[in-house]
Image: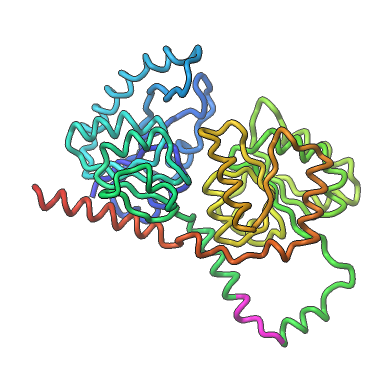
Amino acid sequence: MKILVTGGHLSPALSVINELKEEDLLYVGRKYALEGDKVFSLEYQTIKDLGIPFFSITTGRLQRRFTKHTIPSFLKLPFGFSQSLYILKRFKPDIVLGFGSYVSLPIIITAYLLKIPIVIHEQTLEAGIANKIAGRFAAKICVSWNSSMRFFPKSKTILTGNPLRKEIIEENQKSSIRDIRLSSVEAQAQDKNQKSEAELPLLYITGGSLGSHFINNLVKDSLSQLVKNFQIIHQTGDARQYKDFDDLMKLREEFGENSKNYALKKFLSPKETAEYLKKADLVVSRAGINTVTELLFLGKPSLLIPLPFSQGNEQIKNAQFFKRQGLGEALEQKKITPEIFIQTLKKMLNNLNEYKIDSKDLVDKNAVVKIVEVIKNVYKKKKNKT
């Protein structure tokens, strides 16, 4: 089966790609992270590392309001459609699989005109504007949450769940096995052999794969207090215009003995991310839906600081949803000070048992299998027609 994968929601796309690795795959996306920038996008780097052919596409972003970028963006649309036609004619996919974002639309609309079946996946609690449009052309629509169902035709919409990275599932299974094997007698023996001085709790701080300049600055202004109360793993990203990693590394050196409580990482592998998420007592993060899904699955107490300008206030809604489940707290970026940040973390730490909620049932760990099943069924239907 030849499958063209496209879209901007990389994490669920990678989970499905891993399950489809025996198929003939092509990925269409953005080569560069930002317009006019020469920094390679995460999707380009990741897909190339997997050895999957990657085609870059240039097209206009969907504009929610008129700005100076609206007309130049609109003028790029014909290029996107001409490139899509070339790619589809050359690759001749059996299925087009879309994961949202403006970059997927020219491919999806052109595929529809060429009578190539389309399956899309919506990962958010509602629906992105690109997928709302793409849903009109799709044979099947996979959604992650019940709350998304209302945005698409019922007849072709299926609740599959949001795909989890295999590393998250594997790490959770490993720890579950360790927990089962550890008898109460062994646990008591471990307690007796522990050091008299209790270890500091582990705080994992992340702004996502690209990092968050706001969170990095917040940590910078709070670090003198943080290192006294936590062991910290801080993933900063590597935004060249800010040099947050370099500034924080210099600051770390000023803390003497306490500097050993602060570990800095620009990037983490999926395996490392899964390990730190599982081991952490507390997590500080943005509120992308993939992060929220993983935190729910792991039942991890977390302080979420949603991106204030995400599409449709998506991250703010994600953070509120997470908080309603009883697993953590959410703070608005504009209202956070270092003092509020420290106070909130200390309060959470002192009441950690209140956040230990079993939230696994909210997440379907078989989401990938269900999405692949949808793809195969659409492919079979196409084969039966020909």
Q: Is residue 332 left or right of residue 291?
A: right
Q: Position of residue 129 (x, y in %)?
A: 41, 33
Residue at image coords 86%, 72%: 195
Q: Residue furthest left?
A: 386
Residue at image coords 51%, 31%: 40
Tally of marks: 0
Q: Main secondary structure of the magenta part?
A: helix
Q: Is residue 185 left or right of residue 68?
A: right
Q: Residue furthest bottom?
A: 185
Q: Is residue 283 left or right of residue 375?
A: right
Q: Is residue 87 left or right of residue 319?
A: left
Q: Which residues are magenta?
A: 178-184
- 245, above or below 3, in the image: above
Q: Nearer the viewer, residue 213 or 17?
A: 213
- 275, above or below 244, in the image: below
Q: Position of residue 368 (x, y in %)?
A: 39, 57
- 76, above or below 297, in the image: above
Q: Position of residue 171 (x, y in %)?
A: 56, 64
- 88, above or below 80, in the image: below
Snapshot quadrant of residue 175: bottom right
Q: Position of residue 382 (x, y in %)?
A: 15, 48
Residue at image coords 62%, 59%: 275
Q: Nearer the viewer, residue 144 or 53?
A: 144
Snapshot quadrant of residue 55: top left
Colour scheme used in the picture? rainbow
Residue at image coords 60%, 42%: 208
- Inspect the magenta stretch and tell me whether residue 353 lies in it: no
Q: Residue furthest front?
A: 150
